Amino acid sequence: MAIYVDFVRIEFKGHRWCHMLADTLQELHEFAALIDVDKRLFHRNASYPHYDITVQMRETALEYGALPADRKKIIECAKKLKIELNHQA
């Protein structure tokens, strides 16, 4: 299982946010549940399926084995997840 977190720091509602993706949607949802990320933070209908996570959640994800990912890796995962999501519809 590979989970990826980016380096983005988007300011919103008093927090700094980044994105969490995985090689598959199942892995992504299972990992999010493992580190107690609220399901409402999953963005199914965004340009690509992902979880928004705070910088603090990112640190937890890294402690549990998530990998820091550059833009190239995030885009690669995003494309795979979008295809997977479209096949589920």
Image (tube, helix red, strand yellow):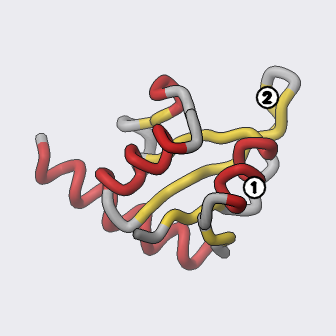
Q: Quadrant of the N terminus?
A: bottom left
Q: Secondary structure at mark 1?
A: loop
Q: Secondary structure at mark 2?
A: strand
**How many numbered marks are there?**
2
- Between the residue at mark 1 and the residue at mark 2, the CA separation in whole angstroms equals 12 Å
On the image, the x and y values in percent for residue 49 come to 40, 47
Q: In the shown orientation, is residue 65 left or right of residue 14?
A: left
User: Which amino acid is tagged 1?
Assistant: Val
Q: In the shown orientation, is residue 69 left or right of residue 39?
A: right
Q: Residue at x 36, y 56 (%)?
A: 27
Residue receiving disc 2: 12
Q: Is residue 42 above or below residue 70?
A: above
Q: Foreground: 43 or 3?
A: 3
Q: Residue at x 83, y 31 (%)?
A: 15
Q: Quadrant of the C terminus?
A: top left
Q: Residues within 10 Å of mark 1 (few under 14, many from 20)?
A: few
Residue receiving disc 1: 8
Q: Residue at x 49, y 23 (%)?
A: 40
Q: Is residue 8 above or below residue 50?
A: below
On the image, the x and y values in percent for residue 34 come to 50, 43
User: Which amino acid is tagged 2?
Assistant: Phe
Q: Residues within 10 Å of mark 2 (few under 14, many from 20)?
A: few
